[in-house]
């Protein structure tokens, strides 16, 4: 449910930056393209996303202070190699995203689309690794509410609870980012997004970097805690 | 009450009520991106919910008229006060003023043709309606209405079989609507102001909306994630709020109030903005201390973010945390006091016209002052221990939320009614309604303050016989208040069709929304306005020429 809602809000946010695309909108035609305004709106939206995760970081901080040894112990169960690989993948995808935006700004629409596909491929690779990581945890009986987990110390239960909630919510954001790129592609192909009108592409790029930045915090908090 | 003819009020373009921007039928409303139509759609939905919430409140009052069980069981009573709270808080008073009057008036007051993101604005309305549908669906699905109170405190909200998940989901969705509206308003205020309108030439209602929008953007995501966690707790048993799994139920309270305290300022700040519009218009002089009022809105928003702990003085916090939260709570009283004193100073030597909006504004100042001062009793550590979870707290927050935000909303509705509909409400009926509301309100909620001090707990379906006189008085107050509210709403609805034409500026007010036709044309202004003075400049008022204030 929360996915659908979050998706529902990214789309209008994205589409609102491009009012000329819908001539039927009462004010669409009369409404001036306002680059600064579109950017202001997008940054405010990104801020609310940060605030969403900030609450979780606060919860993490509180419980880590209370359960320092348990957190260290539980973190040993995480696969550092998988976490670091995913970090490299996501950072690379941010690079391809920057290049995609840049290509569009220089008017190379085809190149921009190819780079977006590359970004999505990297996002997919990230999710596949995530899938195997979570799968391995489930096989060891580590999932919220499992008997094995409930037999552990309170601090470790909380650690894994946070792990699944925070990486899960981040994963949802990765998928939303891919959805935003799929929404974007036909607009670049048809030329509606171009060297003169690239606000939507830039905003999708900003969203993707947010996904990246959040992961950069998740890596040390979970994988590198041991 | 005079319809003064403003030059340039010739109306070549049709009003927004006639010009649907190329759409027809119901689509002319539900798919319209016109901020004015969206505002009216919010109004229609919200006042429907308001009447539902009001009936629930009245049901509780009738049950409490006598000790013992009258006609609803204690379990049903729990569900009714929860639903009353959820509807009134999440569906009415939080989105209320910004979504209805803010949507309608913000672009007009700024001299813009719409908000920055008109389609996002429409999406916000749809998200609001989806959230509202989910909240109402919790009435009929298995498990029935939640019985936790509108705060959904863990651990009970994790355990109860009532449909908490759906209600919480609804609150989450409504939160998104609120965030998007806030985001839209901030961008609009930064980007869409008319030529010459600096920040300090904005009407104070815009300042109120600006501070409100920041709170919406900053605080709402926190409650969003908190409610998601509560749902995960119920479905997957994550354990963040469960001591058996290493969690802590107090954490839920902290997270909930980190949002839900700032959100009381979301309710009150726009109402304060409305009062700051009405007082200069009917005292016919500029507002006293414009910058102080504008900045105190921002100060309330900033400090209000740091006082959530005062809801939890008895919940288990360190003494240090308690006195820090208490101190910060008292600090909020300073900018609030600044506003009240500036309003009173505005009236001094003004040429006051006792119109209906002005009378509502006076009612606001009176009721909100009682609400604010009784809040100090809650903010002080020692006295809060005594009154915590009593009817006193219920009385206090109804004085601020209903007596403040609600009455402020009604004041704004009357003030801008001629602008929105192009017609004038029936003055006599409006005054009778206000009289009933004022008397009924005080009888209803002041009785709660007294019985709370005497020890009547809140959220109880039954009570000791010694509280009966107060409960009886309170219920009689409700029976006076409800007809007053209905009369007010009926008067507005009826006058929207039958009232006398109002003209563009019946109050001879100075802000930009009065410089265009009533109701305004689709794109608000025939010519993009240009601003050269502050918002409340009455030096050119024709009736004040011989006696300038």
Image: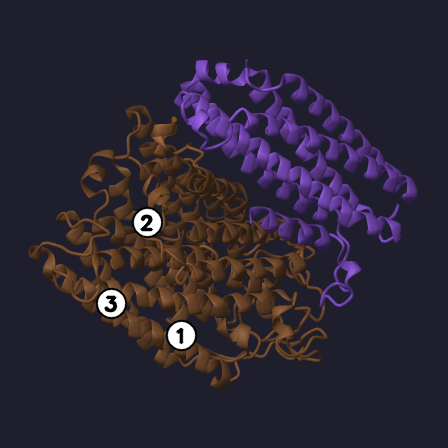
Badge 3 is on which residue?
B478
Asked if residue A61 lies left or right of residue A100, the reply is: left
Image height check: is B120 above or below A181?
below
Letter of the chain shown purple in the rendering: A
CA gap, disc 1 to disc 3?
Answer: 16 Å
Colour brown, chain: B
Chain holding disc 3: B
> Mark 2 vs mark 3: which is more N-terminal?
2
Residue at the spot of label 2: B148
Q: CA distance from mark 2 to mark 3?
A: 24 Å
Which of B406/B452 is in front? B452
Q: How many marks?
A: 3
Q: Which residue is mark 1?
A: B489
- Please identify, in this view, whether the residue under mark 2 or under mark 3 is nearer the observer: 2
Write the residue at 58% across / 49% down: B200
Name the secondary structure under disc 2.
Answer: loop
Q: Secondary structure at mark 1?
A: helix
Crowding at dot 3, Cα within 10 Å, few <14 / some 14-19 / many 20+, comes out as many
């Amino acid at each position: 449910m929360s996915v659908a809602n979050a998706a529902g809000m990214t789309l209008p946010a994205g589409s609102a930056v491009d009012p000329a695309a819908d001539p039927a909108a009462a004010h669409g035609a009369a409404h001036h393209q306002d680059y600064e305004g579109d950017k202001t709106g997008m940054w405010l939206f990104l801020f609310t996303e940060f605030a969403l995760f900030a609450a979780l970081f606060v919860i993490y901080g509180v419980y880590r202070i209370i359960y320092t040894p348990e957190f260290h112990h539980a973190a040993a169960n995480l696969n550092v190699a998988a976490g670091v690989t995913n970090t490299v993948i996501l950072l690379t995808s941010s690079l391809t995203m920057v290049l995609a935006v840049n290509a569009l700004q220089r008017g190379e629409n085809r190149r921009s689309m190819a780079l977006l596909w590359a970004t999505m491929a990297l996002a997919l690779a990230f999710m596949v690794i995530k899938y195997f990581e979570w799968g391995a945890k489930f096989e060891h009986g580590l999932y919220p509410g499992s008997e094995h987990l409930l037999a552990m110390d309170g601090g470790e239960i909380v650690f894994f609870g946070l792990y699944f909630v925070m990486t899960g919510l981040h994963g949802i954001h990765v998928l939303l980012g891919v959805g935003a790129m799929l929404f974007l592609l036909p607009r670049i192909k048809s030329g509606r997004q171009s060297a003169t009108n690239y606000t939507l592409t830039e905003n999708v790029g900003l969203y993707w970097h947010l996904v990246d930045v959040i992961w950069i915090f998740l890596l040390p908090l979970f994988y590198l805690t041991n | 009450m005079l319809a003064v003819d403003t030059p340039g009020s010739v109306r070549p373009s049709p009003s927004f009520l006639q010009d649907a921007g190329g759409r027809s039928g119901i689509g002319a409303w539900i798919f319209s991106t016109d901020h004015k139509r969206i505002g009216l759609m919010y109004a229609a939905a919200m006042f429907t919910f308001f009447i539902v919430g009001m009936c629930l409140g009245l049901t509780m009052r009738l049950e409490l008229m006598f000790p013992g069980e009258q006609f609803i069981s204690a379990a049903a009573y729990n569900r009714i006060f929860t639903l009353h709270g959820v509807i009134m808080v999440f569906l009415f008073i939080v989105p209320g003023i910004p979504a209805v009057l803010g949507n309608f008036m913000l672009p007009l007051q700024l001299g813009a043709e719409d908000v920055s993101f008109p389609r996002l604005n429409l999406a916000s309305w749809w998200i609001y309606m989806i959230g509202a549908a989910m909240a109402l669906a919790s009435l009929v699905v298995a498990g029935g209405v939640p019985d936790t109170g509108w705060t959904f405190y863990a651990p009970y909200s994790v355990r109860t079989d009532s449909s908490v998940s759906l209600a919480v989901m609804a609150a989450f969705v409504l939160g998104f609507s609120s965030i998007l509206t806030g985001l839209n308003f901030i961008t609009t205020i930064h980007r869409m102001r008319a030529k010459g309108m600096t920040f300090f030439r904005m009407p104070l209602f815009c300042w109120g909306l600006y501070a409100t929008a920041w709170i919406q953007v900053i605080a709402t995501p926190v409650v969003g994630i908190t409610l998601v966690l509560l749902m995960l707790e119920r479905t997957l048993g994550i354990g963040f709020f469960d001591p058996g799994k290493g969690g802590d139920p107090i954490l839920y309270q902290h997270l909930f109030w980190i949002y839900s305290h700032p959100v009381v300022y979301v309710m009150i700040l726009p109402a304060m903005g409305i009062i700051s519009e009405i007082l200069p218009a009917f005292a016919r002089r500029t507002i006293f201390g414009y910058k102080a009022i504008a900045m105190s809105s921002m100060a309330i928003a900033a400090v209000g973010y740091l006082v959530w702990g005062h809801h939890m003085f008895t919940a288990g916090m360190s003494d240090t945390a308690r006195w820090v939260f208490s101190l910060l709570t008292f600090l909020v009283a300073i900018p609030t006091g600044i506003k009240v004193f500036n309003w009173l100073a505005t009236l001094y030597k003004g040429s006051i016209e006792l119109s209906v909006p002005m009378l509502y504004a006076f009612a606001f100042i009176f009721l909100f002052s009682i609400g604010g001062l009784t809040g100090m009793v809650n903010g002080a550590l020692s006295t809060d221990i005594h009154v915590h979870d009593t009817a006193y707290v219920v009385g206090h927050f109804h004085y601020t939320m209903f007596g403040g935000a609600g009455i402020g909303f009604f004041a704004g509705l009357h003030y801008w009614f001629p602008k929105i509909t192009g017609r004038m409400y029936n003055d006599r009926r409006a005054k009778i309604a206000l009289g009933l509301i004022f008397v009924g309100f005080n009888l209803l909620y002041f009785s709660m303050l007294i019985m709370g001090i005497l020890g009547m707990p809140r959220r109880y379906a039954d009570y000791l016989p010694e509280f009966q006189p107060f409960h009886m008085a309170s219920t009689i107050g409700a029976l006076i208040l409800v007809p007053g509210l209905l009369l007010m709403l009926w008067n507005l609805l009826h006058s929207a069709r039958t009232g006398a034409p109002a003209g563009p500026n019946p109050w001879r007010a100075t802000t930009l929304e009065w410089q265009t036709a009533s109701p305004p044309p689709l794109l608000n202004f025939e010519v993009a306005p240009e601003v050269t003075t502050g918002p409340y400049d009455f030096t050119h008022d024709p009736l004040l020429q011989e006696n300038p204030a």
